[in-house]
Image (tube, grey):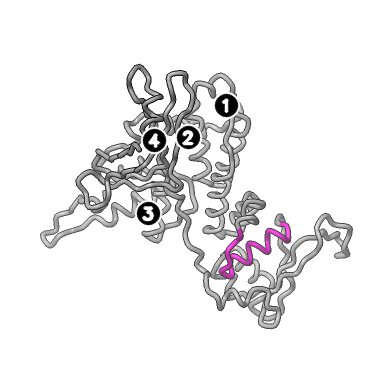
């Protein structure tokens, strides 16, 4: 049997999907095996494993019969595994709170979703059935300032509240939104089926963590093509979906030759054109990493990393890439250390 050894010779750790294949002199596939799960390779000289040995890859006799001009040619297939996008945890995640979901006995407010009303307040034939959702103001107002304001405007403070009408959201989607505010987890099937609707609803009512989770689902499940990239770009810009916008921008940069030939930017706002150009410039930097001191290093980071750092500093993570960078730079500048002698330190965080 023939064994293979693959080693990481760089000073950086990496996680990859990988496989090995061998073709004979006629181009026919003789052997192919790939790992079932991604593999981590530590940096060369580090404490983590930097090399892996794959024993008994294929019979020696079989490979000797597949030499190309006397040489054994092994193709190594590798793909870097991107880290999952950063999504803040659901701040309401608690079994006790989840147990109060749709509990009409303890509820003190009611949301009215669906149906259409005419001026005389009589119901007419509607596309969606009218659904009432009992809820608790103390929970809702801590998850959505917008819904909290709607509660206040309906007399919830005086105890004379009437049902709070919710428009622009279907009952099914509002149920998922409300369930999330009670600490529930939106199932994978529901997320895939209603991802865009959840982005719209969460954006409308300020439930940021759900919006980011639904946005990540869209990025993961959408095959970006020439036919839909401009639509995705405009949508992501209108909803401040920085991760989706980054994915669309990456596609434009990776296919810039075809983009110039096939797509028209006539109806694209000037700010988006600027963003596309900025993405092209970032992509031309070596390895996508831009040097810089102080807060300048933020300009080279991906959206997911920017969101993670903003979240760690207690900053708003729902915004454009430019908004995230500006907020982080401001926070970085305010954290400049002044030593006992009154001299300012420009040290960057250790992880940079």
Decide if residue 313 is on the left or right side of residue 93: left
The residue sitting at the top extreme is: 69
Q: What kind of element bears circle 2?
A: helix
Whether residue 278 is visible here, answered yes or no, is no
Q: Provide the residue designation for mark 4.
A: 59
Residue ID at (61%, 77%): 99
Q: How far apart, in angstroms, are the residues tagged by discs 2 and 4?
A: 42 Å
Q: Provide the residue designation for mark 2.
A: 250
Give the label on residue 149, or none: none
Write the start and end of the magenta stretch as one range: 170-187
Q: How far apart, in angstroms, are the residues tagged by discs 3 and 4?
A: 50 Å
Q: What kind of element bears circle 4?
A: loop
Give the label on residue 265, or none: 1
Instruction: Name the chief secondary structure element in magenta.
Output: helix
Whether residue 178 is visible here, answered yes or no, is yes
Q: Nearer the viewer, residue 83 or 237?
A: 83
Q: Nearer the viewer, residue 75 or 1?
A: 1
Pair 3/2: label in front: 2
Decide if residue 122 is on the left or right side of residue 105: right
Mark closest to the chain's N terminus, 3 or 4? 4
The image shows residue 153 at horizontal and vertical percentages of 66, 69
Q: Is residue 181 magenta?
A: yes
The residue sitting at the bottom extreme is: 105
């Amino acid at each position: 049997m023939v064994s293979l050894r693959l080693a990481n010779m760089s000073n950086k750790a990496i996680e990859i999907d990988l496989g090995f294949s061998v073709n004979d002199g006629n181009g026919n596939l003789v052997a192919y095996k790939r790992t079932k799960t991604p593999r981590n390779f530590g940096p060369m000289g580090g404490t983590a494993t930097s090399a892996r040995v794959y024993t008994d890859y294929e019979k020696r006799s079989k490979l000797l019969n597949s030499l190309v001009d006397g040489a054994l040619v092994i193709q190594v297939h590798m793909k870097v595994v991107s880290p999952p996008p950063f999504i803040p945890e659901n701040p309401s995640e608690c079994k006790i709170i989840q147990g109060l979901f749709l509990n009409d006995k303890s509820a003190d407010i009611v949301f009215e979703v669906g149906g259409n009303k005419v001026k005389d307040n009589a119901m007419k034939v509607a596309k969606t059935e009218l659904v009432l959702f009992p809820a608790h103001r103390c929970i809702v107002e801590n998850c959505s300032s917008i819904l909290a304001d709607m509660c206040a405007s309906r007399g919830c403070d005086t105890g004379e509240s009437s049902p709070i009408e919710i428009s622009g959201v279907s009952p099914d989607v509002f149920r998922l939104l409300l369930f999330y505010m009670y600490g529930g987890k939106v199932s994978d099937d529901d997320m895939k089926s209603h991802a865009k609707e959840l982005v719209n609803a969460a954006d409308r009512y300020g439930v940021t963590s759900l919006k980011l989770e639904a946005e990540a689902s869209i990025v993961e499940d959408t095959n970006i093509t020439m036919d839909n990239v401009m639509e995705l770009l405009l949508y992501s810009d209108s909803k401040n979906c920085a991760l989706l916008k980054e994915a669309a921008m990456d596609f434009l940069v990776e296919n810039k030759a075809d983009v110039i030939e096939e797509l028209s930017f006539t109806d694209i706002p000037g700010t988006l054109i600027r963003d596309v150009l900025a993405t092209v410039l970032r992509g031309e930097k070596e390895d996508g990493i831009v040097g810089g001191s102080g807060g300048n290093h933020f300009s080279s980071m991906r959206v997911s990393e920017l969101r993670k750092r903003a979240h760690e500093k207690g900053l708003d993570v729902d915004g454009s890439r430019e908004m995230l960078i500006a907020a982080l730079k401001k926070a970085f500048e305010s954290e400049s250390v002044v030593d006992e002698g009154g001299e300012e330190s420009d040290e960057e965080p250790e992880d940079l």
